[in-house]
Amino acid sequence: MADVVDKNSNNSSSSPNKKSKKWLLIIGFILTLITVSSVLGWRYYVNSNQIKLGGEIINKKIVDSYSKEISTYYKNNSLNLTESSRKKAIDDLLMHAALKEKAKKYNISISQSDFDLEMAPVYDTYGGKSQFNKFSKPEGVKNFIINNSENEIYKKKLKSKVISHKKLLIVSITVDTKFFNKLDETERLQKIQEAKQQIQKDYYPLFQKATPAKNIISKANTKIGYDYPEGYDFRAEWVGMVTKAYYFTCADTIENCFNDLPNYNLANAVKTSSKIKTLTKKGQSTDVFMSKAGFVGIIRLEDQYGENYTSWNDFLYQFNKKYSKQLKKMY
């Protein structure tokens, strides 16, 4: 008699194996999901509690250590700290990292000679470079001193690339001179008006017609160009009105670019900086105005360069704003 084969025998024996494999896959998937979630969660925690910028890492532990160095430095040198050591630590470290990020962007580095030159006054206080290296670390101030020195070097090297600057063409007559000051008030105001009329007549049309700067400069009594020539004799300004034409470059919103005097109100004088702020496009000119820096003049925007930061304080402020969430956790 032929053997009778149970058709369900294979299915019944393989069914538990299939179920086991299915559960193993589910468990594996769950474990993988837990692992990935844990890794991502940890990364999120770490990234939300620290800043990576310019090859530097800033976190609470680093801020703690740096804050202690600041307190030690100010105490050792009998200096008054105008803000909390923690606030200063965060600002210093963030500035350092942000500057290094910009230095990388513009391929700028600090050489040993750059560093030693900046550190020279510090070396002197310690009695030499070797003495600084020997004692600054045990004193607990070495990182603070080095970071601050590097920050100053980076600022000098990066200023023209990062801080917004305007290159200006200026035609002016200085009225704060012996020639004007020897006059009584009525005569002085009359001469100032004459100075305005002279610039209005001879130069304002040239500025409006976009006349090349070299042509404007060649027309002036004193053809300064980019800067006062060595040995420039100011005595000509003692005996009469002298028209000067020159380039001047300054940061976009620095109030003291022209040393404006707040209380200088002669002939309705205005801040030079307020006039410069109105120049937003290349080729734009001001009207003829009396400046609180003691001159009558007209200014044209020749060029502007740098990034959208008006000063280093503004630079730091923008990075504080960018990383505000992480920074809050470091106080």
Image (cartoon, rainbow, N blue to C red):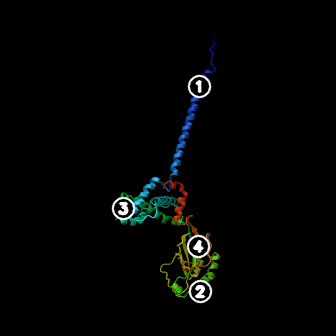
Q: Position of residue 88 (x, y in %)?
A: 46, 61
Q: Residue at x 44, y 60 (%)?
A: 147
Viewer-side label of 3, 2 = 2
Q: CA separation, marks 2 and 4?
A: 25 Å
248 or 121: nearer the eye?
121
Q: Position of residue 258 (x, y in %)?
A: 53, 75
Q: Secondary structure at mark 3?
A: helix
Q: N-terminal of the two: label 3 or label 4?
A: 3
- Residue reaching furthest to the top: 1
Q: Residue at x 52, y 54 (%)?
A: 326
On residue 274, the disc is 4
> Residue type at mark 2?
Gln
Query: In the figure, is residue 196 to the left or right of 228?
Result: right
Viewer-side label of 2, 1 = 2
Q: Position of residue 240 (x, y in %)?
A: 54, 86
> Residue type at mark 3?
Phe
Q: CA separation, marks 1 and 3?
A: 78 Å
> Residue type at mark 1?
Ser
Q: Which residue is mark 2?
A: 190
Viewer-side label of 3, 4 = 4
> Residue type at mark 4?
Ser
Q: N-terminal of the two: label 2 or label 1?
A: 1
Q: Which residue is mark 3?
A: 132
